[in-house]
Image: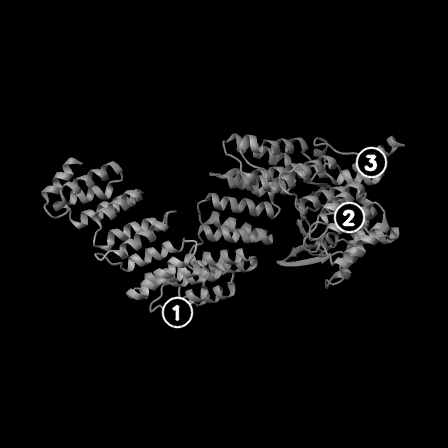
Amino acid sequence: MTTYLHLAAAGGGGCPTPVRSLLSRCSSLHHLQQIHAHLTTHPLLSPAPLLHSLIRSAAAGGHLNYAGHLLQHFRPSSPIPWNFLIQAHSKSPSSGESIRLFRLMLALDSVSPDKYTYTFILTSCCREPSPLAGDASHAMALKSGFAFDLFVANSLVNLHSEFGRLYCAQRAFEEMPLKDSISWTNLIKGYAKQGKMNVARKLFDEMPHPNEVSWVILIAGYVKVGNYHDAVKLFNYMLQSSNDRPSEPVLVSVLSACTHIGALTQGRWIHAYIDKINLPMTVNITNALIDMYCKCGIIDSAKEVFGLALERDLLTWSCMISGLALHGSGNEALKVFREMVAYGVQPDSIAVLGVLNGCSHSGLVDEGCSIFYRMSQSWGITPEIEHYGCLIDLLGRAGELQKALGIIFKMPVEPDIIIWRSLLSACRNYRNVELGERILDQIVRFDLIKQGGGHLLVSNLYAAAGRWEKVAKLRSIIRDEGEVQKPGWSCIEINGEVHEFVADDRLHHQIVDIRRKLNEVLREVAEKGGYLANTELVLFDLSEEDREQAVHLHSEKLAVSFGLMNMAAGCSIRIVKSLRICEDCHSAMKGISYVFDREIVVRDRSRFHTFKEGRCSCMDYCVLNRLWYLHTGSYFFMLNSKLAEISLGFEELIVMMLAVELAIV
């Protein structure tokens, strides 16, 4: 360092190459201070380029406060060092410091902003809470004549787009004498950010040469507003019309779109494409693939991606845990959660929520309660209302209704309608009419017309208990108050076309053939698989024959019948259902999978059910509880977490139920 400083002194008024070279590599604050001291003690040997290099090195090394001190001490007349520091602050959380430096610069008569100054300051203004500083900077740029420079104008379009002022952004764009790809991209981003995808797409189609960023913005914009099909179509168009190879953000966005619409074929193709072009399997792509496979019902593929992952972050573990929970694999979700903790990864609230959900779907009451009560002690996570909701659901599904109610009253947060509805649903499953009526008193405090389902759930509870006079009274209230719930539906995709069914559907163009096929299927399943219609699930006062017909025409049965008609033998049948699958349909699906040797995957409102060879991946947890209760009347049998791991075929279930009945008699 001393040698270089002597060289500087020997160089007279110039800036010797060794010193400039030293500054370009210097990141130590101590060395920068040595040079600063030398310049202070030798003011005649302090050429402007050396001052500029000193300030630039301080800013580049992250010593922004020190660089600011240098700037204010020397107050150079060139805008270059000012630009260095304004740009550095524009990229940091302290972007407001850029505005302060800009104001100081304007207050000096010795220095004037140039086009780069305005470019950097407008970038800083984008991070401000209000557009006031940006408006002032825009006015200054107009006054100084820099507003129509390409770089400054691009920054103006971006500024107004960030604050959602699309009229101003559009005007700045149209007034530009020259435009480049950044100009178009900034405007497209503004419209996409506001959800105006029609305008964004129109601009995109007019753009002379779409770049990689514009593809990302438009595809991600479609995903953000829920136009998932358009996102997938645009991705396919990109592959056909552009020489740009899809980047990581594009692939992550389109995989997210596939996840939302259940486009498994497209998602698998994207995975194969990633392997084909040898794109690095980054942690973001890994997470997107795991999430896509889990939510499209292919849990084994999700496990494979997870197992091969070279890098895992907290989201990777959380996706796998939540995916296993979604498929009812509570024990596996618990195992992965414990592995994550053993690897030293600190769980967050989302990871804990996932494992609690897995415990709830698998009846792991002790394990779930243990994790819930360890949240704050072991991992410093304060339980939120979603965690309490999982705990209530866990206890409710297991029949621990009074314990769940006690926790609700002791919660430090106000229970929402979702928690009350969860417990009310458990009351219906276990025929606890008295507790259900008490819960209704809590639910009526909410806006049931907006929240939906409060009176309807209690009505269904009365119907399940055969109290038809109460049903009639409540349904009269439902009609008067307008608490109408949209009918449940089931969807199935055949050859790229989605077909939707509702209970007792009469509108599908093949409904006559579908009903005929369904009757044949259920008759064969009854003969070969032991299926018996569970008519106690009907929520209307009907004759036994009409009750049996009502359960036969549930939407998922119509969908699976349509699948058997139109899909080749051996193909898996995948159904998405808006409500939870009922006990009767659950039994029917097990029988159909056994008799017709088909894998049937049903994604209902809360989880996946994979039916294969007469068994279900949920291991019949909670369904068995309800079936036993229905068959034995006033006697109640509850499976503990160990028994819940046993998966029974339909014939085994009948034998066990008969044995229980004989024991009671």
Mark 1 is surrounded, within 10 Å at the Cα level, by few (under 14), some (14 to 19) or many (20 or more) other residues, namely few
Name the secondary structure under disc 2.
helix
* Residue 203, picture quadrant: bottom left
Which numbered mark, 3 or 2, is in the foreground of this view?
2
In the figure, is residue 408 to the left or right of 90? Answer: right
Tag 1 or tag 3, which sits nearer the N-term? 1
Residue 289 horizontal side relative to residue 484, left or right:
left
Q: Secondary structure at mark 1?
A: helix
Q: Residue furthest right?
A: 665
Given residues 484 and 185, the one toward you in this image is 484
Closer to the N terminus: mark 1 or mark 2? 1
* Label 2 neighbour load within 10 Å: few <14, some 14-19, many 20+: many
Residue with the mark numbered 3:
657
Quadrant for residue 113, please give it.
bottom left
Residue at the image position 55 percent from the left and 36 percent from the top: 381
Give the amino acid type for the residue marked by disc 2 in the picture.
Val
Q: Which label is found at residue 458?
A: 2
Q: Which mark is residue 636?
A: none
Q: CA distance from mark 3 to mark 1?
A: 76 Å
What quarter of the picture does the N terminus occupy? top left
Residue sitting at 52 percent across and 60 percent down?
Answer: 195
Residue 163 lies, in percent from the top left, at 44, 59
Three-letter amino acid code of the residue under disc 3:
Met
Question: According to the image, label 1 marks what residue?
Answer: 174
Determine contact: label 3, label 2, CB under 8 Å.
no
Query: Is residue 621 rendered to the left or right of residue 84?
Result: right
Instruction: Give the percent coordinates (x, y) of residue 176.
Output: 35, 68
- Can residue 504 be spotted in the picture? no
**Mark pair 1, 2: CA separation:** 60 Å
Residue 659 to residue 200: above or below: above
